[in-house]
Amino acid sequence: MSQTEKRAGLLRRTSSSKKPLKEKVVLMYEDIFAEEPTKSNPRFWDELFLMKVNLEYLEGKLESLDGDEVLRVKDNINSLFQHCVQALAEEHQIKVVNALQTLCALFRGVHQKNRSATGFDIINMLMGFDKAELRMKELMESLDALLCGDGSQSLKSLCLKLLLCLVTVTDNISQNTILEYVMINSIFEAILQILSDVSSRAQHGYDAVVLLALLVNYRKYESVNPYIVKLSIVDDEPTLDGMGRVIHHALAEYNRQYKEKEEENQGGFFSTLTSMVGSMFIADADEKLSVQTNEAILLALYEAVHLNRNFITVLAQSHPEIDIATTPAVPVPASPLTPLGTTPPSLDMMNNPELPLDPNLQTSNLLITFLKYSSIVMQDTKDEHRLNSARLCLIILTCIAEDQYADAFLHDDNMNFRVNLHRMPMRHRKKAADKSNPSRPLVCAVLDLMVEFIVTHMMKEFPMDLYVRCVQIIHKLICYQKKCRVRMHYTWRELWSALINLLKFLLSNETILLSKHNIFQLALQVVNLFNMFITYGDTFLPTPSSYDELYYEIIRMHQVFDNLYCMVLRVSTNAGQWKEPASKVTHALVNVRAIINHFNPKIESYAAVNHISQLSEDQVLEVVRTNYDTLTLKLQDGLDQFERYSEQPREAGFFKELVRSISLNVRKNVSLSTMSQDVLLKEFSSIS
């Protein structure tokens, strides 16, 4: 049978001379688009909702209507919408199922028809202006009752699919005027109830969290959004914990899929070939490891962290780390076309709030899983989706690094974890992460992630924005350490080396980078990080020898700082757009240059007196230790101050585009998983 025949709802050909038969439901739809259907059949609406919905036909018919036809059948479409809403209150479950699916077809079909029309035209076509408020109130109350009631899990799932369909029918959700009624008739409490209950969370938590993230972003910069207000004040622990678990397991599922692909790639012919011919295939290998990012769940995590201070406690709640793949899974019904990384996690994992504790089992939490996720998506920022995901990961980490409670548990020496971050394949090191990572406070893993990003993205398509965010996160963490006098046993030398190499890269590519970016902003941030260590290092570096090592690194790499000074001096003395930012870097370098100019002559003198051509590290450190007293440094103000994160206005454009992308993806997946009509009808067939 051809696609056209399927779309028209044809069943079969009786003979070559006869027209093909049509499904009864299609004949009933034709009545709706032709005349007042109850004229010829008073029981029309009762019978309609006992029929299996033909989504394709109904959507296609609505989409194909021309202007005159719309005016002619508007009252009938309004009547269909009204009877759908009324059918949601029926005890007959088949009618409720069919009414929900018909509403999906109506929302989608009318919006496809009215792509260029205003929201008010759509409202009039669906419900009529005069009845819209009443109809939407009835619809939202019915959906709320179905979601909060003790009824079928399938019906609850269908309600959430309908709501996701309604929210995402327009590319820009803020242009979806129907959502004004969803703001007035809130289902926020129903979403919270789903997340707080173990059983319903296992079934519907993923859709509920994504729905909430989207609703929070409706006109968030233009008016008061009740979902933002309500989310910001939630303090119910089971609810927040439930939200955290849904997000945790979605990210963990992504990590598992990536790990599987990674292990698959490391075996077989490809791996053998790579080892034979060297690292020329690294780029290809990395492409093979690509797993589609889950921006919707990241957005949900961001909104929770950004809006609700109570959610910060959820990040640190520990539980045993188990491999999802080894657990017998009850699959969630989903379309096989759903992209990897965007499917809800297995039900059994979400259904176990308490897992048996094993003293030999590594513990984990949402933050660890998020850091591992970030280490994967931040490897490759060439793809737009992965670039957006990396940016969002860094924004989330920025919010975390600014939070006093989050900083407290990040730096808590009694909360140690072994975090194996994924590392980008590079020619000079092995791909596999170091399995012998010690258990350390979580701030070490955050700093490792920042260092990893800094050393692996110095490339022609320089992600300036991401670098600025990385350095800001490091700065905020160090400000906390200085303020609270937290002495972290961290390999600071790796960070210093990464920052110096970043300055070296900026110098080497000055001409190319300046045509696109203000590299002086980034250079200033990096130099001021060194100024933080120079000025306040005695308050947070773990030992006096760490302070000596800082001076050693500055002296050892003095050529980079000398070259940077020459460059910024040249730019700041010439008239041009970069004069002022370059001048700031010149002033910031005063103490670094004082250290270099003070110690270098003394090192050269020591070498000459002792007739040594090349001093060892210990000998240089000895010169440093014995000459601190005569070093003069200038006190610089504001080094431990930073601008707090604000979404509006700087990030508004980014989030608008991100939500648009997520909305398109959710709409595609909702329409693909046509809510499994046959399964639903079979489930309720005993009732019918």
Image (cartoon, rainbow, N blue to C red):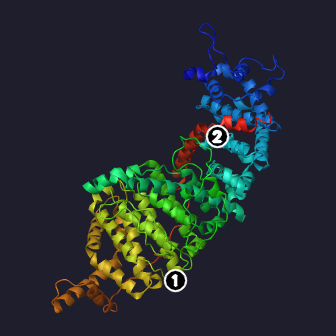
Position in image of residue 627 (x %, y %):
31, 91
Q: Amino acid at mark 2?
A: Cys
Position of the N terminus, as image quadrant, is top right
Q: In 3D space, how far apart are the residues under numbered discs 2 and 1 (Cα atoms)?
A: 51 Å
The residue positioned farthest toward the top in the image shown: 17
Which residue is at a point 46% across and 63% down the rendered structure image? 469
CB under 8 Å between callouts 2 and 1?
no
31 in relation to 633, above or below: above
> 90 above or below 526?
above
- On the image, the x and y values in percent for residue 370 come to 53, 62
Pick the front one: 216 or 372 = 372
Q: Earlier in the sequence, mark 2 or mark 1?
A: 2
Q: Is residue 58 above or below residue 340?
A: above
**Disc 1 designates what residue?**
485
Q: Look at label 1 and name its amino acid.
A: Arg
Check the picture and name the quadrant holding the C terminus. top right
Q: Quadrant of residue 514?
A: bottom left
Q: Can residue 370 be seen by looking at this rendering? A: yes
Q: Secondary structure at mark 2?
A: helix
Mark 2, residue position: 165
Identify the residue at horizontal 53%, vertical 66% (top origin): 368
- The percent position of residue 650, horizontal first and vertical second, equals 52, 56
Crowd around label 1: few <14 · some 14–19 · many ≥20 (10 Å):
some
Q: Nearer the viewer, residue 83 or 186?
A: 83
Left or right of 453 on screen, residue 460: left
Q: Quadrant of residue 113?
A: top right
